[in-house]
Image (cartoon, rainbow, N blue to C red):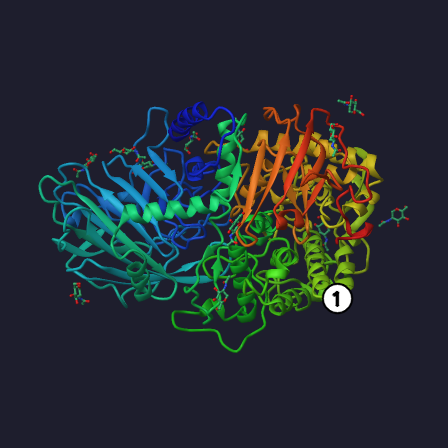
């Protein structure tokens, strides 16, 4: 696209002035391409937001694949510019509330085409066929085919829009749409407008996009002329469907059913001669009330200072992104952009809704848009642990606060403004929360490893970060031991888990869908591993042993007698198991490109096979805390290695879904880290790039972004442990600053000669490792201490893929059955 071309011109200039070492990157925001993954199902949000901001203001389109509003395909029309979005999700379109729209030239107020279908227009299309849209961290702009130019930026709870009308516009008009969220589910809309100040206040109830819950959202819009006094509107009114009603100021108490087309419409006086019509719209949002939306807007953007907000927003992103520095010498511009774009995307969700929790009163932080922890626990928080501990701690506090307050799954859907849950202080950790509502769980209750990840890394600093160790542990135990009334939405099917040490396929248990039993078993085992890690740190030896034992429950589903049809050597599979201990059978090819039945494995009742979003053969690799035991069960090192090769060579590896994520790095456990390097780099080369379609499926709220960033950094995380698996970074050096420790760790590749295009050859294999000049115990992983202390990690690279983890006792990465995790 055009923006990529422009940036590469700039980079050519930069590298020509800095031929040797690239020096610190002071404006990493300039390397971020927010349009990556904005078509072909990536569902990435390219609009303006602060890191983890609540206001995510962006363009909405009439694309069928617009879960985050936008689609980079220029054949789709713009339908509005709304204030709230998620990013990279599946489900239905989420949020997309409170669209604004500008009319440069409707013939008369009453004739403005106000409904979505009639108002929508195409964007201007550039000669290469792409839309005339631009985005960078904290900023989005577009030129529409009706002559309107729209620019957007945001503070945490307030968006500011700049509408530049075509020259000679005499009647600039702006519309506020109260009811059209993405899936168009509104009920009980309320709205008033002030005919002199043009303030619009309103809100409605809407459906959460991935669960049964509903939420209420509010807005407050004000207008100002840029560079001139806007003056009172010359015409004002409401609109319903396609009918503006001039003079009407109030739509309260009129509509109660599903109403998805109503709002306010203004005509403003034209700018004084010599000035263009440039109208700023400041739009506050709130989940509490429209008064609070106004207060948020007044507090955050008192001055309507679009450029000020934009530059402060960008500075915030730059401070965050600058914590990770790469040397770009000998590295393609595209790789650098891929890296910083990934670092950017992993800070879009979850969103900081602190002060906006409608369900209970608390002074703790409140984060929302965990969509879903099942996606993000694998990599995202381990990257956050490296460079953003304060945000991580606030998210953990918010999760614990949810667990302490939201105990009743039946009352939440009837909540409305001013009603608070009281009397419950024991609930479950969130799993797939969105728009303040519980949404469907996927595999497990995967806040457990997220809390485990935090505590394993920051237990020494928990008090300083205001995380209560006791509350954290209580929250974990609630998940592990207590069965919630509806385990489709939170927690686990804990009674079955405790009775059988796996989730039986034939346990017809009220309270949730009897599906995904194998996936849930494997996730719960990993969750219990995380709990055992926390218990160990807390000195609770009995609990540590208990949960470590339960972590081995994964192997209760191992059926040695099942093999891939036609390939008897790939033997032993995770399989669904009945209460009586016997196994059911799911074809190992199920849910892969070789599935003879092409059966579904998504979240629906038709999926009776026990597996979620990946095949049995992929899930049979998924015991991240005890790969050593898996190697034993799979017939030893050689057979394990050939099984991994089989998975890749036969197309079972599927990076569009998270259970495959760690598979490229599993060669490490068989002392073949060079093969991990080859596989991991090939996955990057084939499936991740800077194009608008450059993601293999949804970004999943930053899960794939974290995966990308780790791969390019030459690492893969093991959540809730002190280890990061190590390969070679795509940069001659990468430095990670941790603001809590005030320490910087640099991984430097001696002999770096660039990255092979196909990812598999070249001088990219780690031969040996030193830390602060001393030979390190392993070439295959780094301990957390390396990052705590701020170290210089030096890698010696070779072009020989037959490298090993080293010869010492601790050379192989740890596994539970071979001594566990120190
Ligand atoms: C854009 O969308 C149209 C309509 O869905 C489709 O026919 C076309 O192939 C898409 N273009 C690109 C570049 O993906
Ligand atoms: C865009 O809108 C125009 C007219 O409003 C319509 O003809 C066209 O089909 C729309 N494009 C898509 C992809 O729906
Ligand atoms: C839109 O048009 C303006 C000039 O009116 C131009 O500066 C800008 O680059 C164009 N494109 C975008 C995406 O804003
Ligand atoms: C408004 O302007 C657009 C773009 O110039 C044009 O296509 C449209 O016909 C105009 N509408 C009216 C009512 O003048
Ligand atoms: C409308 O706004 C004006 C100007 O800010 C203010 O004086 C007036 O009180 C407002 N009217 C209502 C009904 O709030
Ligand atoms: C922890 O809480 C104290 C007291 O409320 C506050 O002053 C401090 O800023 C908090 N620290 C963090 C990291 O949130
Ligand atoms: C696997 O097959 C062996 C030999 O037939 C049998 O003894 C064993 O019970 C079987 N295991 C399972 C889990 O079916
Ligand atoms: C056993 O597996 C088959 C095939 O996946 C499935 O249709 C059936 O429902 C399973 N049986 C039970 C009791 O879940
Ligand atoms: C870019 O990534 C997408 C998504 O994985 C992939 O389909 C496409 O082939 C890649 N393009 C290139 C040129 O590698
Ligand atoms: C952080 O470390 C740097 C040196 O690396 C030092 O100059 C600075 O004073 C330290 N800051 C704090 C707050 O300790
Ligand atoms: C690392 O490998 C290189 C090349 O074989 C060798 O020269 C160097 O001494 C090794 N360093 C350590 C610490 O083993
Ligand atoms: C690596 O090992 C393989 C098989 O053991 C061998 O064929 C290959 O030549 C070795 N590569 C190098 C560079 O030594």
Q: Quadrant of residue 291?
A: bottom left
Front in this rendered view, residue 547 or 311 = 311
Q: Residue at x 35, y 41 (%)?
A: 140
Q: Position of residue 540 (x, y in %)?
A: 74, 67
Residues packed near mark 1 inside 10 Å, few (<14), some (14 to 19) or many (20 plus):
some
Identify which residue, 28 or 295, lies in the foreground. 28
Q: Position of residue 622 (x, y in %)?
A: 71, 46
**For this view, does 264 lie left or right of residue 180?**
left
Q: Position of residue 778 (x, y in %)?
A: 75, 40
Beta carbon at label 1 within 8 Å of ligand 6: no
Residue 471, picture quadrant: bottom right
Relative to 487, residue 637 above or below? above
Question: Along the line of sight, which residue is nearer the eye, 608 or 651?
Answer: 651
Please name the residue shown 43% across and 38% down the image.
26
Q: Secondary structure at mark 1?
A: helix
Q: Judge whether residue 208 can be spotted in this image.
A: no
Say which quadrant the N terminus sits in: top left
Asked which quadrant contains residue 489, the reply is bottom right
Q: Position of residue 325 (x, y in %)?
A: 52, 39
- On screen, residue 567 versus residue 591, left or right, reads right
Which residue is disc 1 drawn over? 543
- Residue 630 seen in the figure: yes
Query: Is the residue 319 above or below the residue 126 in the image?
Result: below
């Amino acid at each position: 696209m055009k923006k990529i071309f422009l940036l590469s011109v700039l980079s050519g200039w930069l590298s020509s002035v800095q031929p040797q070492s690239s020096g610190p990157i002071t404006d990493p925001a300039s390397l971020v391409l927010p349009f990556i993954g904005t078509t072909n199902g990536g569902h990435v949000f390219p609009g303006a937001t602060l890191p983890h901001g609540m206001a995510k203001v962006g363009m909405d389109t009439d694309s069928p694949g617009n879960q985050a509003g936008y689609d980079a395909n220029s054949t789709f029309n713009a339908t509005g510019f709304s204030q709230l979005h998620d990013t990279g999700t599946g489900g239905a379109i989420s949020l997309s509330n409170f669209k604004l729209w500008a009319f440069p030239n409707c013939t008369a107020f009453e004739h403005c085409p106000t409904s979505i279908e009639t108002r929508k227009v195409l964007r201007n299309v550039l000669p290469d066929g792409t839309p005339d849209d631009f985005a960078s961290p904290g900023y989005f702009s577009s030129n529409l085919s009706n002559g309107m130019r729209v620019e957007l930026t945001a503070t945490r709870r307030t968006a500011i829009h700049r509408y530049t009308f075509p020259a000679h516009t005499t009647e600039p008009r702006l519309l506020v749409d109260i009811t059209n969220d993405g899936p168009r589910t509104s009920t009980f809309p309320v709205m008033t407008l002030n005919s002199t100040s043009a303030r619009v206040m309103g809100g409605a109830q809407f459906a959460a996009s991935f669960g049964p819950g509903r939420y209420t959202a509010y807005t407050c819009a004000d207008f100002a002329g840029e560079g001139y006094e806007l003056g009172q509107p010359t015409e004002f009114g409401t609109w319903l469907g396609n009918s503006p009603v001039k003079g009407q100021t109030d739509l309260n108490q009129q509509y109660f059913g599903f109403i998805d087309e109503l709002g306010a419409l203004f005509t403003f006086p034209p700018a004084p001669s010599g000035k263009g019509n440039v109208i700023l719209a400041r739009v506050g949002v709130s989940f509490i009330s429209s008064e609070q939306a106004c207060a948020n807007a007044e507090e955050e953007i008192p001055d309507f200072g679009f450029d000020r907000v934009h530059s402060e927003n960008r500075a915030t992103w730059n401070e965050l992104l600058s914590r990770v520095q790469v040397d770009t010498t000998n590295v393609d511009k595209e790789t650098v952009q891929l890296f910083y774009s990934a670092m950017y995307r992993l800070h879009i969700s979850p969103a900081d809704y602190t002060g906006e929790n409608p369900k209970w009163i608390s002074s703790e932080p409140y984060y929302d848009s965990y969509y879903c922890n099942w996606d993000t626990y694998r990599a995202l928080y381990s990257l956050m642990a490296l460079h953003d501990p304060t945000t991580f701690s606030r998210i953990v506090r918010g999760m614990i606060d949810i667990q302490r307050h939201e105990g009743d799954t039946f009352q939440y859907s009837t909540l409305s403004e001013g009603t608070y849950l009281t009397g419950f202080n024991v609930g479950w950790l969130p799993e797939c929360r969105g728009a303040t509502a519980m949404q469907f769980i996927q595999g497990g209750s995967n806040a457990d490893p997220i809390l485990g990840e935090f505590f394993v890394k920051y237990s020494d600093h928990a008090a300083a970060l205001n995380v209560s160790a006791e509350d954290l542990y209580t929250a974990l135990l609630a998940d592990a031991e207590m069965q919630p009334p509806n385990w489709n939405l939170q927690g686990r099917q804990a009674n079955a888990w405790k009775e059988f040490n796996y989730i039986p396929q034939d346990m017809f248990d009220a309270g949730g869908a009897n599906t995904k039993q194998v996936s849930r078993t494997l996730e719960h085992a990993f969750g219990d591993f995380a709990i055992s890690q926390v218990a160990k740190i807390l000195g609770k030896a009995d609990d540590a042993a208990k949960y470590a034992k339960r972590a081995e429950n994964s192997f209760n589903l191992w059926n040695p007698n099942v093999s891939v049809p036609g390939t008897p050597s790939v033997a032993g599979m995770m399989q669904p198991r009945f209460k009586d201990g016997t196994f059911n059978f799911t074809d190992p090819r199920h849910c892969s490109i070789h599935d003879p039945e092409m059966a579904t494995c998504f979240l629906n009742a038709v999926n009776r096979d026990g597996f979620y979003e990946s095949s049995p053969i992929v899930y049979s690799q998924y015991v991240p805390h005890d790969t050593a035991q898996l190697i034993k069960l799979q017939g030893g090192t050689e057979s394990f290695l050939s099984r991994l090769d089989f998975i890749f060579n036969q197309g079972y590896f599927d990076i569009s879904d998270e259970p495959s994520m760690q598979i490229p790095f599993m060669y490490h456990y068989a002392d073949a880290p060079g093969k991990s390097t080859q596989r991991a780099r090939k996955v990057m080369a084939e499936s991740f790039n800077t194009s608008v379609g450059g993601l293999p499926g949804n970004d999943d709220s930053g899960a794939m972004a974290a995966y990308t960033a780790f791969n390019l950094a030459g690492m893969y995380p093991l959540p809730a442990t002190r280890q990061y698996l190590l390969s070679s970074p795509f940069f001659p050096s990468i430095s990670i600053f941790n603001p809590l420790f005030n320490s910087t760790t640099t991984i430097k590749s001696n002999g770096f000669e660039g990255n092979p295009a196909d990812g598999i050859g070249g001088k990219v294999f780690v031969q040996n490792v030193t830390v602060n000049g001393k030979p390190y115990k392993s070439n295959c992983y780094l301990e957390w201490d390396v990052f705590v202390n701020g170290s210089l990690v030096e890698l010696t690279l070779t072009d020989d893929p037959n490298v090993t983890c080293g010869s010492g006792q601790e050379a192989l990465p740890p596994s539970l059955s071979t001594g566990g995790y120190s």
